[in-house]
Image (cartoon, grey):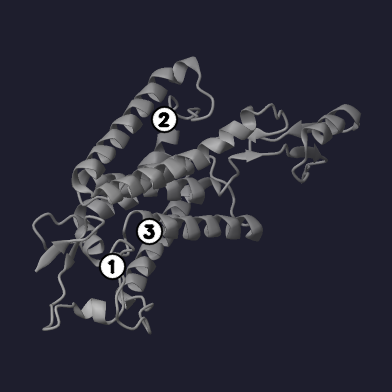
Amino acid sequence: EIVLTEGGRQEPFLAIEATGRTQDQDSGRRTSLMQPRSRGSMRHGHRVPVSQYLALAIWELLLCLQYALIRYVCTLGIPHDCHDHSDPVKFMTTIQYLLFPGFVLAIFTGMHWPDRFEYIFSFRQRLCLGWLFLPMFFGFGVFWGSLDLVPAFRHFSLTEVSAGYLLLFLLLGAGFLLILGWHVMVAYRFNSKAGFAAYIISRLAMLVFYTSYLLFKLADQPGLQFHFHHYAFGYILASLAEFNHPISILLLAGGTSVFVQGLAAYGADNIIGHHVQIHTESGLTYTSPEVSFEAFKFFTEHCHSKWAESPVP
């Protein structure tokens, strides 16, 4: 028998014994803080089912496979300005950002729940959404990178909106609002009040976090550079997609793919950062550590050699 839990997910109903209590209650294990506290012993009630570890491991493996695919595509010149990941410090920073925020994304979207995992990776059921999710997941990142080969899209940026890209920027903004509105509507219609509140508060917290980068830049700090990388945009989009619906599944696949593509092609570059100096002399390139705006001015005004500011980190 199937019942809806407090979060709106379908889970098998545990058999009720003669005492009127479920086996789950007798074991002391609750799946929600909203459920009454069990009278049974809590010993060993903390154990996590092995299936949840397996689902999370498969999700992290998919992220790594997507990373490897994008790195291979980079060798083909897609996009043309892929960054070199031979530096072990930058490589490990990127992998850290891939795996740990990727793990949080799995929790946000319920990948560790058996019913959710089976819904996304179903290949035999009527919807067969596995054949929808996997091609979108592995293909959209390559497609996104290949837009760099189109001269009209090569210089598009989410940070600096020029007149030539105003229409494209407005279309992206309208699409984001449409997707956001659809997911909020679904959360309101099919979640409990507590589930809806949790969905809205958690997503607002993420939006506030990423907005704070811009607020620091706008807080009269000329020494900070700001660049909103598309890996962050993809991450925000993917975090919305927690529902068992083809639209939400496509958003999860596409948003996650853009997130991984940004990290694999360019690395986990900072959204805000200090200035970095690039100096070229006798064919050799020297890079300074990140420095404050005052130090940047000192270098450019007092050093005899020609120093140039690097692109936004």
Residue drawn 46% across the image and 44% down it: 206
Work out whether residue 6 or residue 214 is closer to the camera in this orientation and state it.
Answer: 6
Tell me the tag on residue 61.
Answer: none
Give residue 27's quadrant in the image: bottom left
Q: Which residue is mark 3?
A: 107
Residue 291 located left or right of residue 252: right
Callout 2, which amino acid?
Val
Return the x and y of residue 159 as percentages of the image width and height: 53, 29
Give the label, 3 or 2, closer to the camera: 3
Task: Specify whether residue 141 is in view.
Answer: no
Give residue 7's quadrant in the image: bottom left
Other residues around mark 1 within 10 Å, as few (<14) / some (14–19) / many (≥20): few
Q: CA distance from mark 3 to mark 1?
A: 24 Å
Residue drawn 8% across the image and 57% down it: 126
Give residue 183's quadrant in the image: top left
Return the x and y of residue 146 as percentages of the image width and height: 40, 39
Work out whether residue 189 or residue 206 is closer to the camera in this orientation and state it.
Answer: 189
In the picture, the quarter occupied by the C terminus is top right
Residue drawn 47% across the image and 55% down it: 101
Q: How many marks?
A: 3
Work out whether residue 27 or residue 299 is closer to the camera in this orientation and state it.
Answer: 27
Q: Which residue is mark 2?
A: 150
Callout 1, which amino acid?
Pro
Callout 3, which amino acid?
Ile
Tell me the tag on residue 36.
Answer: 1
Closer to the chain start, of discs 3 and 2, is 3
Other residues around mark 3 within 10 Å, as few (<14) / some (14–19) / many (≥20): some
Kindly state the secondary structure of the residue where label 1 is placed.
loop
Residue 212 located left or right of residue 3: right
Return the x and y of residue 263 as percentages of the image width and height: 50, 49
Give the label, 1 or 2, closer to the camera: 1
Other residues around mark 2 within 10 Å, as few (<14) / some (14–19) / many (≥20): few
